[in-house]
């Protein structure tokens, strides 16, 4: 399944955030099901951004 386009959800992410974005997608898809992150981003972008920001706030490289 193709990965979400980072630019579609967030504009001009710094490189570290891009890596964290990929990790967030991978983790979310593993916790729920393949494609969950993409579905959430399409159906509820505000919730997707909230969850991603929570992930960034709680985890760092």
Image: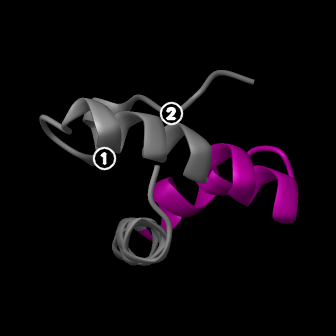
* Residue under pointer 2: 4
Q: Secondary structure at mark 1?
A: helix
Q: CA distance from mark 1 to mark 2?
A: 8 Å
Q: Which residues are magenta?
A: 25-44
11 sits to left or right of 55: left
Whether residue 32 is visible here, answered yes or no, is: no
In this rendering, the answer to whether 40 lies above or below 25 is below
| Residues under numbered marks 1 and 2 in contact, where contact means CB atoms less than 8 Å apart | yes
Magenta stretch contains residue 43: yes
Q: Residue at x 74, y 45 (%)?
A: 35
- Front-most of 18 and 33? 18
Whether residue 15 is visible here, answered yes or no, is: yes
* Residue under pointer 1: 9
Residue 39 position, x and y percent, is 62, 54
Q: Magenta region, mostly helix, strand or loop?
A: helix
30 sits to left or right of 20: right
Seen as rendered, the residue at the extreme top is 2
In this rendering, the answer to whether 15 lies above or below 60 is above
Q: Residue at x 59, y 44 (%)?
A: 23
Seen as rendered, the residue at the extreme left is 12
Number of numbered discs: 2
User: Residue 44 falls in which quadrant of the image?
Assistant: bottom left
């Amino acid at each position: 399944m193709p990965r979400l386009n980072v630019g579609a959800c967030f504009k001009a992410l710094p490189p570290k955030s891009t890596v964290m974005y990929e990790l967030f997608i991978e983790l979310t898809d593993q916790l729920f099901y393949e494609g969950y992150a993409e579905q959430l981003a399409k159906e509820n972008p505000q919730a997707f951004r909230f969850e991603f920001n929570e992930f960034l706030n709680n985890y760092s490289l």
